[in-house]
Image (tube, rainbow, N blue to C red):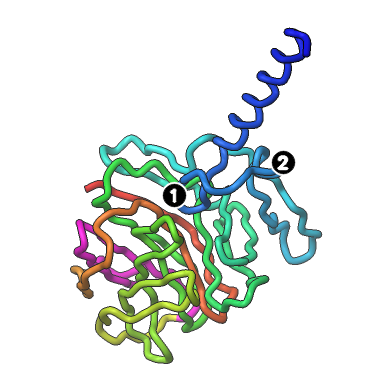
């Protein structure tokens, strides 16, 4: 074999290795999947063009970070009207108001979406606060402490048919939330906005949920998480397609 041909083969092999090393896990960025052409362009979302207009698939070009520093120390704002993806077959639409889960294509009825790429949170101890526009009493919630296997800590709006916010965990074994602790009962306000906030510090977890027009309460729920680290975040719903994620803000500490 000529020296020129051997050099060409070495260059080609290096290119293949470099491409494989760019693969990233949906939740943590760990190298465990191979990117395809659409991954290189960015995740595909369904752009909601309005009730009377045709919807179209939009490829969102990645900025390299699914977050922005809004100028305040330790504050990371996630742009909720841009790129999300789902680790369990959830479908979604996004527009200038935010992002809404429209259903699921897999065998699970708790579709999950996560920012893609995940925001650059500078600490394992942080608080996630999400504003959600809702139409009726339903189960929806926010995810934190995301692990490499796509397990999460969950703060949900209700467990079963009782309107009591709860803290628990969710894993890809069945994508069903497990109950850890519950907060006080509340009366659901239809066609309003709710804020959900969860703080993680080591294995300690605090949560609260309140109507956006009301004063922010003290922490309502406390539990212990199985994990002391994990910076990935997300959102989920159960048997509903109406909640809209309007904002996601991370504060550190």
Other-residue count near label 2 (Cα within 10 Å), few / some / many at <14 / 14–19 / ≥20: few
Other-residue count near label 1 (Cα within 10 Å), few / some / many at <14 / 14–19 / ≥20: some
What residue is at 27 percent from the left and 69 percent from the top?
207
What residue is at 58 percent from the left and 48 percent from the top?
33
Q: Are marks 2 and 1 in contact (CB under 8 Å)?
A: no
The secondary structure type at the circle numbered 2 is: helix
Q: Is residue 56 left or right of residue 206?
A: right
Q: Is residue 65 above or below residue 118?
A: above
| Residue 205 among magenta residues | yes
Residue 93, how many percent across, how many down? 64, 60
Residue 46, how many percent across, how many down? 69, 57
| Residue 53 among magenta residues | no
Q: Which numbered disc, 2 or 1, marks the residue that appears first in the sequence?
A: 1
The secondary structure type at the circle numbered 1 is: loop
Residue 72, how many percent across, how many down? 29, 38
Q: CA distance from mark 2 to mark 1?
A: 20 Å
Give residue 59's mark. Answer: none
Quarter that holds the N terminus: top right
Query: Of residues 228 and 248, which is closer to you in this image?
Result: 228
The residue lying furthest to the bottom in this view is 161
What residue is at 63 percent from the left and 38 percent from the top?
61
Q: Which residue is disc 1 drawn over?
A: 28
The residue lying furthest to the front in this view is 1
Give residue 37's mark. Answer: 2
Q: Residues in magenta?
A: 190-216
């Amino acid at each position: 074999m000529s020296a020129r041909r051997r050099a060409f083969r070495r260059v080609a092999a290096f290119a293949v290795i470099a491409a494989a090393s760019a693969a990233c896990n949906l939740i943590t960025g760990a190298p465990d999947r191979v990117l395809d052409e659409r991954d290189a362009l960015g995740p595909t979302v369904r752009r909601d063009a309005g009730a009377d207009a045709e919807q179209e698939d939009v490829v969102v070009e990645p900025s390299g970070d699914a977050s922005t520093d809004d100028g305040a120390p330790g504050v990371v704002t996630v742009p909720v009207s841009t790129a999300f993806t789902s680790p369990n077959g959830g479908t979604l639409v996004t527009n200038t108001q935010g992002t809404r889960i429209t259903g699921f294509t897999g065998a699970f009825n708790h579709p999950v979406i996560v920012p893609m790429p995940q925001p650059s949170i500078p600490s394992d101890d942080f608080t996630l606060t999400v504003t959600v526009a809702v139409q009726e009493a339903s189960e929806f919630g926010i995810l934190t402490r995301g692990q490499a296997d796509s397990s999460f800590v969950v703060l949900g709006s209700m467990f079963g048919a009782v309107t009591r916010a709860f803290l628990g965990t969710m894993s890809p074994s069945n994508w069903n939330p497990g109950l850890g602790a519950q907060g006080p009962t509340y009366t659901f306000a239809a066609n309003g906005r709710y804020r959900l906030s969860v703080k993680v510090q080591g294995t300690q977890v605090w949560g609260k949920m309140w109507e956006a027009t009301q004063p922010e309460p003290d922490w309502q729920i406390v539990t212990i998480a199985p994990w002391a680290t994990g910076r990935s975040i997300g959102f989920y719903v159960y048997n509903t397609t109406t909640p809209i994620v309007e904002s996601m803000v991370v504060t550190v500490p």
